[in-house]
């Protein structure tokens, strides 16, 4: 088992490094002081939203619109996170009951009424959520600043915990997958050998199968590093 343990550890480590090279710069940029400041400053200075006993009230004239920032428009057009045709990121109107028709009329990504929050999912489905599950809170730019200041010290732990979680998950997944594949392959081979009346115990066959899993695991590593799609079964056929 030591050989497979080492091999699956190496495979999980390579996968974690590849994931890290892709995600770490994105996470570092997103949680950088400049990005946090941009998020804070994007909340309108004059707006104060109060949620109390599941009902929303504001201090501004309604309907109130928060337009989609120009910086998000190219990305929205590319991956559909915010549909290109949407003009507003958030619309607040506590004077209406809020229906899917209102959501469409306001050309918005999120519509907040007195009692409901309506938003569009990535698949285009409209989701309606009652606000009585939300805690009582007053949200304004000062509160957003306080929240970001409270959680910012923990940002430095996100990347280590993320990479550790990826490594542990991939190691467990790879190890269990390898052992199951070796077990199934061993069982089939052992039955064939028994039919042929070859003198091999199941333990011997399983031991050989563990070493034979080297090829599929190496193919997986190559696929991870190069980005080439190498079907797992190719390694099994090569055996």
Image (cartoon, helix red, strand yellow):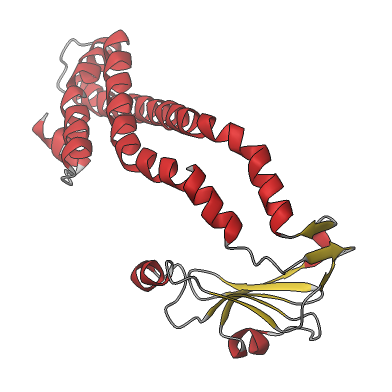
Q: Quadrant of residue 184?
A: top left
Q: Relative to 16, does residue 201 appear above or below in the rendering?
A: above
Q: Tell which of 110 and 3 is nearer to you.
A: 110
- Residue 58: x percent and y percent? 80, 72
The quarter of the picture where the C terminus appears is top left
Q: Quadrant of residue 24?
A: top left
Residue farthest front in this picture = 45
Residue at position x 50%, y 76% from top? 124
Q: Nearer the viewer, residue 129 or 184?
A: 129
From the viewer's perspective, is residue 109 above or below residue 18?
A: below
Vertical position of residue 105 compared to residue 41: above or below = below
Q: Residue at x 14, y 39 (%)?
A: 234
Q: Residue furthest left?
A: 238
Which quadrant does the N terminus fall into?
top left
| Apparent side of residue 120 relative to residue 168 in the rendered image (left or right) | right
Q: Exactly how many numbered labels are in the figure?
A: 0
Task: Name the spot of residue 118 as percent of width and height, x first.
Answer: 67, 74
Query: Picture coordinates of residue 106 (x, y %)?
Result: 61, 86
**Residue farthest right in this picture:** 53
Compared across the picture, whether 166 is left or right of 136 comes to: left
Q: In the rendered view, tell whether residue 188 sits above or below residue 138.
A: above
Please tell me in which quadrant of the rendered image residue 7 appears. top left
Residue at 63 percent across and 83 percent down: it is 103
């Amino acid at each position: 088992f030591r050989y497979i343990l080492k091999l699956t550890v190496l495979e999980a480590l390579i996968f974690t490094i590849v994931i890290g090279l892709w995600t770490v710069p994105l996470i570092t940029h997103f949680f950088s002081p400049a990005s946090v400041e941009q998020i804070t400053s994007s909340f309108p200075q004059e707006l104060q939203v109060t949620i109390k006993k599941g009902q929303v009230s504001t201090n501004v004239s309604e309907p109130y619109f928060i337009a989609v920032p120009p910086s998000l428009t190219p990305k929205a057009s590319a991956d559909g996170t915010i549909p290109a045709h949407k003009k507003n990121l958030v619309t607040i109107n506590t004077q209406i009951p809020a229906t899917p028709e209102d959501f469409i009329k306001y050309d918005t990504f999120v519509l907040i009424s007195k009692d409901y929050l309506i938003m569009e999912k990535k698949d285009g489905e409209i989701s309606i959520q009652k606000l009585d599950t939300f805690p009582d809170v007053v949200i304004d730019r000062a509160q957003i600043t306080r929240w970001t200041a409270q959680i910012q010290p923990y940002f430095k732990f996100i990347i280590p915990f993320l990479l550790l979680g990826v490594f542990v998950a991939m190691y467990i997944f790879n190890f269990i997958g390898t052992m199951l594949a070796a077990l199934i392959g061993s069982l089939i081979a052992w039955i064939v050998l028994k039919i042929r009346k070859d003198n091999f115990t199941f333990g011997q066959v399983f031991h050989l199968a563990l070493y034979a899993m080297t090829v599929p695991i190496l193919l997986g590593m190559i696929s991870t590093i190069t980005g080439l799609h190498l079907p797992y079964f190719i390694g099994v056929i090569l055996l």
